Amino acid sequence: MFSIIPKHTALSLFKRNISQNFVNVINIRNNPLWWIYKESSIRYFYYNTNISSLEYFRFNNADARTYSVVPNTSFISIKDESRELMAVWPDIVRDLTDAGRHLDIPDVTKWLMKVLQYNVPCGGKNRALTVVEAYKSLSPPDQITEENLRLTRILGWCTELLQAFLLMVDDIQDHSEMRRNQPCWYLYNDIGLTAINDALMLEMCIYQLLKKHFKTKECYVNLLEQFLSVSLKTEMGQCLDLLSTNFGKKPNLDLFTMDRYNSIVKYKTGYYTFVLPATAAMSFAGITDPEMYRQAKTILLEMGHLFQVKDDYLDCYGSIEDIGKSGTDIAEGKCSWLIVVALQRATPEQKKILEECYGQSDIEKVNRVKQLYQELGISNTYAIYEEETYNLLHTHIQQISRGLPHDLFLKLLNRTCRKIGRKD
């Protein structure tokens, strides 16, 4: 951390336009990873960051640029890479079902194939795409071979298996009905709680693939530790989310603080959606510098926060066609960004309405909460927050050092956190 810095340093490092709107709404974003907005006694803006001014200059002058990795130019479009991932998918299914065949339990093998096909390949594959993009950006050209790209795509499918496992359990706990424009797995053909065991099988499939394809690689232990660590963090985040909703009973809105919300997002979403895909690719690319991992994690968790706030917004204001499911955060009493900001702004009378209506499935009460959001200007506040956060993330990416390619993080930001809000 650094505090007051000289005028010429402050201007060269942080010269940017800060709107008054951002100053007005900064209280909605109380996060220790965030650049904390302040004004010094000599009336120059500065930010507390995790990158010191000396380190910034060390890695952003002409001499230090030799440390940077030259981005690989052999990128293909996201659409084409998605096709490449799907071309590997039959091999993934075969690898995983072969293990069952060796155990002489053909019924289970057939069932596992059905579980895999229904739950894994039908999403946007954002995590798998991040793995591939990161590996291509971070690896020297001579390491980007067809075999290594194939292994990278297999690693990407491991992150998609983790996503499918987590969503399957989450849908059961939240009593969700739709996922990716189709019935949730536990509701499909009355599968019910059998889906819990199916989710556990998907989780174990991750380690089956890692063992089969990476056991002889130097990164194998690191990959195992990364997947295990992120799985634990995500499940703890899910637990905090469930505790906040009071396990489906009437939620205690006094617990719905921005600090609590930030913790839920960090652990339930940020690590497995953003940190794991990038750091797994870094491990496979042979990167061992702890500072590179630290800087990557910092910016990736910030992206994860914006991504989840956007998801909360779409749950209320998006259509089923847009998000592939019906919005249920209000009825389920979720600790979402919208309710936290609403509670910060509500009058005592408005808080009474939220206490009465939030967490209730009655459509009239859900609509009353949405009406209150409108009265409080939550949609406009989101649009301001989204624009300012996006711009600050863009600036922070430009300050990344230690050989991490800016282009990789800018592409990830544009692909996963594109702006959707509209200011009044």
Image (cartoon, rainbow, N blue to C red):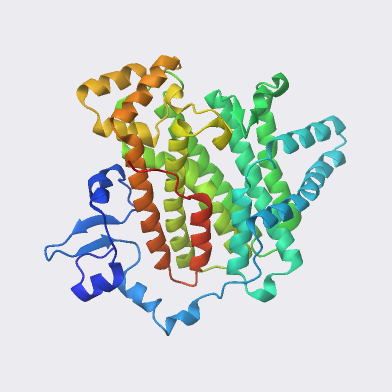
Q: Residue at x 32, y 61 (%)?
A: 49
- Residue 392, quarter of the rendered image: bottom left
On the image, the x and y values in percent for residue 31 come to 33, 48
- Residue 351, quarter of the rendered image: top left
Q: Quadrant of the N terminus?
A: bottom left
Left or right, 375 with respect to 278, comes to: left
Q: Residue at x 54, y 74 (%)?
A: 69
Residue in the foreground of this view, choosing between 60 and 285: 60
Left or right, 184 with respect to 16, comes to: right
Residue in the foreground of this view, choosing between 153 and 267: 153
Left or right, 42 with respect to 93, comes to: left
Q: Residue at x 59, y 49 (%)?
A: 126
The total of numbered circles placed on residues is 0
Q: In this picture, is 6 found above or below 96?
A: below
Q: Residue at x 63, y 39 (%)?
A: 164
User: What is the residue that sits farthest to the bottom in this orientation?
Assistant: 63
Residue 216 appears in the rendering: no
Residue 347 appears in the rendering: yes
Residue in the foreground of this view, choosing between 80 and 48: 80
On the image, the x and y values in percent for residue 272 come to 54, 47
Q: In this picture, is 387 found above or below 100?
A: below
Q: In this picture, is 284 found above or below 239?
A: below
